[in-house]
């Protein structure tokens, strides 16, 4: 669910951020699927799960807008029938850890119903923001490059060019804006960085190589850059390659999942490298803050990648800049993603929350963090709420068997009323090595 797909949003929205330039709190009233939503962000890692259509992507879209003052697609529009005066505002702690709060210029928006536009009063003042969107695209906010485009006369709708949105092949082939080249693209930059003389640990190719190693799914399958090569008579570019266990593969021919990983690796290095260049040109120190938004971390990824990508993403920023303060907001449907962060999750800095429905209203519930051990534990935890990590038919057969063993005839479904019917269903649906079988055999005497 994206902002553009929602027909009704609406009423006041407040954002609160701490003095360290990370999102601290988010409060929505009458906006999106929930009538009211209150989010308490951890300063490092924030995980959101829940059923489809409850607002996970919407939350990241609003977080992106709060951080950048721009939308990744169409802006949110107030509900026409609402009698509330639409307004979006933000605040910031003026002293780290202190009780005093001040209004942040540029994060208060009023909606003009006649023009159907939000009107900002000024720019946002955040660090780098990278949004890995669920559609495979990426959005980037760089304060050093974007500030010069700002102006109080701009509306959110026509200021979209201050952020960089990569759609389709933009990330690979390059991105332009206003007749200018704002990104050469992965293919050209990778080869250009690789051919730079006087490489050192801070050079972009060295950083890219390190990021690829960090994002690799397994020590036996490290991703390393190979020698560029030509792949087509119709394309005169040298194409980067990656060394895989079965040989060097041009990046244009890798799988969709690996393309997503390679794109993320390149983008993080590109964002930091270009931010350093822009900061030097404008005479300002580079930022020390990075907010990474990741929608459905597991998209297109094999389970081996699902259990490594998010912890690796947390480590990547340190490789770019040792003093970088990174905040990650990630949505997921994958129990492996949640299991993957068990070794690194810190309740002091991290949060896990689940979207749920209660009496027809969408809620966001914080989950008290507890290790579940494996994917079965996570699937049957509050995060996903399955009674059993099985097919629906196998779950029904086992629950019928358990009802029979405790002599609860009222809990038996119509087609599983007898011991013989249940036995046949179990034999058809439950494998012979399943730990349920010994209890059934001992209790019923069935072989």
Image (spheres, rainbow, N blue to C red):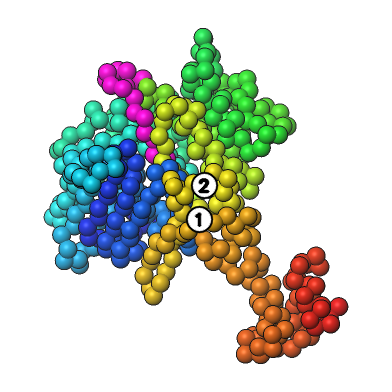
Q: Which residues are magenta?
A: 277-293
Q: Which residue is rendered at x = 63% and y = 55% of the image?
A: 373
Q: Which residue is rendered at x = 48% and y = 43% of the image?
A: 136
Q: Nearer the viewer, residue 82 or 325?
A: 325
Image quadrant in which the C terminus is located: bottom right
In the rendered image, the residue lying farthest to the front is: 98
Circle 2 sits in a helix, a strand or a loop, which is it? Answer: loop
Say which mark, if any, is on residue 168. none
The quarter of the picture where residue 1 lies is bottom left
From this viewpoint, is residue 31 visible? yes
| Residue wearing tag 1 | 369
Q: Nearer the viewer, residue 250 or 391?
A: 391
Q: Which residue is rendered at x = 57% and y = 35% of the image?
A: 215
Disc 2 + disc 1, Cβ < 8 Å: yes
Residue 124 in percent (x, y) is at 25, 38
Q: Which residue is rendered at x = 46% and y = 32% of the image?
A: 317
Residue 225 in percent (x, y) is at 60, 24
Circle 1 sits in a helix, a strand or a loop, which is it? Answer: loop
In the rendered image, the residue lying farthest to the top is: 198
| Residue wearing tag 2 | 345
In whole angstroms, how far apart are the C-alphas of marks 2 and 1? 9 Å
The quarter of the picture where residue 230 lies is top right
Residue 238 in percent (x, y) is at 56, 20
């Amino acid at each position: 669910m994206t902002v553009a797909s929602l027909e009704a949003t609406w009423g006041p929205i407040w954002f609160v951020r701490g003095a360290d330039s990370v999102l601290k709190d988010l409060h929505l009233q009458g906006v999106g699927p929930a009538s009211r939503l209150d989010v308490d962000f951890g300063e490092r890692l924030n995980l959101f799960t829940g059923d489809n259509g409850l607002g996970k992507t919407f939350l990241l879209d609003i977080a992106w807008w709060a951080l950048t003052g721009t939308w990744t697609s169409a802006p949110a529009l107030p509900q026409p029938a609402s009698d509330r005066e639409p307004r979006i505002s933000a605040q910031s702690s003026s002293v780290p850890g202190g009780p005093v709060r001040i209004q942040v210029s540029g994060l208060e928006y009023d909606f003009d119903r006649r023009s159907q536009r939000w009107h900002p009063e000024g720019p946002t003042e955040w660090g780098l923001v990278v949004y890995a969107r669920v559609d495979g695209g990426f959005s980037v906010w760089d304060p050093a490059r974007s500030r010069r485009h700002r102006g109080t006369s701009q509306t959110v709708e026509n200021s979209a060019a201050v952020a960089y949105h990569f759609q389709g092949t933009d990330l690979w082939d390059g991105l332009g804006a206003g007749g200018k080249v704002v990104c050469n693209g992965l293919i050209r930059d990778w080869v250009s960085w690789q051919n730079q003389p006087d490489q050192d640990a801070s050079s972009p190719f060295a950083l890219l190589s390190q990021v690829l190693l960090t994002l690799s799914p397994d020590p036996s399958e490290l991703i390393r850059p190979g020698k560029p090569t030509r792949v087509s008579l119709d394309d005169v570019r040298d194409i980067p390659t990656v060394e895989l266990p079965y040989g060097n593969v041009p990046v244009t021919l890798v799988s969709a999942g690996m393309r997503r990983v390679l794109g993320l690796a390149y983008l993080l290095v590109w964002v930091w490298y270009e931010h350093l260049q822009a900061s030097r040109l404008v005479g300002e120190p580079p930022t020390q803050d990075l907010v990474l938004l990741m929608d459905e971390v597991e998209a297109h990824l094999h389970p081996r990648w699902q259990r490594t990508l998010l912890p690796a993403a947390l480590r990547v920023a340190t490789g770019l800049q040792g003093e970088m303060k990174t905040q990650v907001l990630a949505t997921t449907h994958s129990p492996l993603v949640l299991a993957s962060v068990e070794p690194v999750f810190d309740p002091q800095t991290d949060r896990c929350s689940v979207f749920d429905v209660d009496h027809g209203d969408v809620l966001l519930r914080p989950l008290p963090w507890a290790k579940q051990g494996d994917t079965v534990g996570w699937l049957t935890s509050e995060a996903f709420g399955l009674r059993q990590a099985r097919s629906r038919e196998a779950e029904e057969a086992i629950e019928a068997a358990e009802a029979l063993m405790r002599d609860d005839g009222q809990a038996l479904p119509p087609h599983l009323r007898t011991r013989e019917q249940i036995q046949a269903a179990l034999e058809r649906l439950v494998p012979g090595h399943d730990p349920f079988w010994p209890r059934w055999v001992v209790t019923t005497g069935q072989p």
